């Protein structure tokens, strides 16, 4: 009999029936085998007793108190799914100062939670977000154990693409956090795109995070994933191991994951719970809060209506005189809704000649660094950021609509009034 087992949370019983003693129940989510700190886990993994446990329980967590390995039976042999190391030897476990184990305070519970949830259905967005966030915390911890020089190429790419500098101790921490978040947002987004591709519908298809750059097609992400996947300075940080585990977790997500939202909305549903699980303080500092699509649509339609009725812009948000700025765009919910509203307006005014609709839409939108600018169709110029801010006429908490100065600014205050 194994030393322990993993059981799902018991469901509420509707009838008063004496439950079977839990000690006699099969541990549905795996068994646990514990050995002394001096034990060799390589030898234990090949033990016939562990093989029998794997055949009976499916998963087995073996440990010598300083290392943990989650095993699964595959092709007649034990395969390690994931491991966690506290100390390399028994001597180190008992002699190292307690302060050296501080980082395990949160990372070890994360690992044990993943082990216990490995066989649980992965359906809810928040559950998938938590699993990926737990791997992201492990990746960040590994990154923080290495000098910043290890990331020089990637740091330069992020600095150039984002237009920001990472300086000082806080800057270094923020860089590592930004690096890890970018990797995991990229992997999740690539997984969504992969699911919609023909490749995902072939027999036995499995997502591989190394194809993320292929699906995202963003230069900085191509550079980032190239650096992480190739042998080099970043290879010593062992981020590949964590990203492999994250990719395997996404392969366990069930089809019911998309029952409450469309696939194209998945990133928006994932963004906030991921950051909440990954770094709650960072989420609070950055002001990341999910806005329901119904509220987004209402606000966009409201502004479009007022531009037409109060400011004389017959095309509303599609007017060539209107500028849109979203300095806190997050996953782009407002920007996407604005583009959809503009698309509908262009269709309404195109009549039977719709051939150039998508060309007009794509050439009128300029997206840069979390800001959205709509190009002046007359001059073809984006203009300066400072000049656009001068034209501000409406400010919400994080949303702004700008219009050219020469337009009449009568009844501008009505933009902030609620709809009757």
Image (spheres, rainbow, N blue to C red):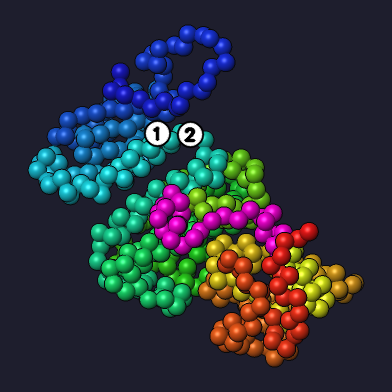
Q: Residue beneath label 1, please?
A: 116
Say if mark 1 contacts mark 2, CB within 8 Å.
Answer: yes
Percent x, y of residue 156: 37, 76
Q: How many marks?
A: 2
Q: Residues within 10 Å of mark 1 (few under 14, many from 20)?
A: some
Q: Residue at x 78, y 59 (%)?
A: 420
Stretch in magenta: 275-300
Residue sitting nearer the eye, 406 or 13: 406
Percent x, y of residue 361: 73, 74
Q: Residue beneath label 2, please?
A: 120
Q: Secondary structure at mark 2?
A: loop
Q: Is residue 363 above or below residue 30?
A: below
Q: Secondary structure at mark 1?
A: helix
Q: Residue at x 40, y 33 (%)?
A: 116
Q: Residue lying farthest bottom?
A: 379
Q: Residue at x 30, y 42 (%)?
A: 108
Q: Please say whether residue 246 is visible from this viewpoint.
A: no
Q: Please say whether residue 348 is visible from this viewpoint.
A: yes
Q: Does the magenta segment cover residue 196?
A: no
Quadrant of the rendered image containing residue 72: top left
């Amino acid at each position: 009999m194994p030393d322990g087992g993993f059981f799902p949370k018991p469901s509420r019983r509707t009838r008063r029936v004496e439950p079977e003693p839990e000690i006699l129940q099969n541990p549905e989510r795996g068994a646990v085998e514990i050995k002394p700190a001096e034990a060799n886990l390589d030898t234990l993994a090949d033990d016939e007793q562990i093989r029998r446990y794997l055949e009976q329980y499916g998963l087995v967590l073996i440990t010598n108190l300083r290392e943990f390995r989650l095993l699964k039976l595959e092709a007649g042999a034990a395969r390690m799914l994931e491991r966690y190391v506290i100390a390399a030897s028994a001597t180190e476990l008992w002699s190292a100062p307690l302060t050296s184990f501080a980082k395990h305070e949160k990372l070890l519970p994360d690992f044990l939670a993943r082990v216990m949830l490995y066989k649980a259905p992965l359906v809810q967005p928040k559950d998938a977000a938590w699993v990926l966030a737990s791997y992201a915390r492990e990746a960040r911890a590994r990154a923080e154990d290495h000098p910043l020089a290890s990331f020089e190429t990637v740091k330069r790419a992020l600095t150039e693409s984002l237009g920001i500098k990472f300086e000082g101790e806080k800057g270094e921490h923020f860089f590592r956090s930004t690096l890890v978040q970018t990797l995991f947002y990229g992997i999740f987004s690539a997984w969504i795109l992969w699911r919609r591709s023909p490749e995902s519908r072939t027999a036995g298809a499995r997502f591989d995070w190394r194809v993320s750059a292929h699906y995202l097609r963003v230069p900085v992400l191509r550079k980032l994933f190239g650096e992480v996947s190739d042998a080099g300075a970043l290879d010593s940080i062992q981020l590949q191991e964590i990203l492999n585990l994250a990719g395997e977790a996404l392969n366990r997500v069930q089809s019911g994951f998309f029952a409450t939202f469309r696939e194209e909305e998945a990133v928006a549903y994932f963004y906030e719970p991921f950051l909440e699980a990954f770094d709650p303080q960072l989420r609070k500092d950055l002001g990341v809060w999910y806005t329901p699509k119904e509220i987004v649509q209402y606000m966009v339609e409201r502004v479009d209506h007022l531009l037409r009725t109060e400011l004389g812009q017959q095309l509303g948000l599609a007017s060539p005189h209107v500028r849109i700025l979203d300095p806190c765009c997050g996953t782009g919910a407002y920007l996407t809704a604005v583009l959809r509203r503009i698309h509908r307006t262009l269709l309404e005014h195109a009549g039977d000649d719709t051939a150039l609709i998508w060309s007009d839409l794509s050439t009128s939108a300029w997206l840069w660094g979390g800001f959205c600018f709509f190009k002046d169709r007359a001059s073809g110029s984006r203009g300066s950021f400072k000049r656009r801010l001068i034209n501000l006429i409406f400010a919400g908490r994080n949303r702004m609509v700008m219009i050219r100065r020469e337009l009449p600014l009568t009844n501008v205050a009505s933009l902030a009034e609620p709809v009757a």
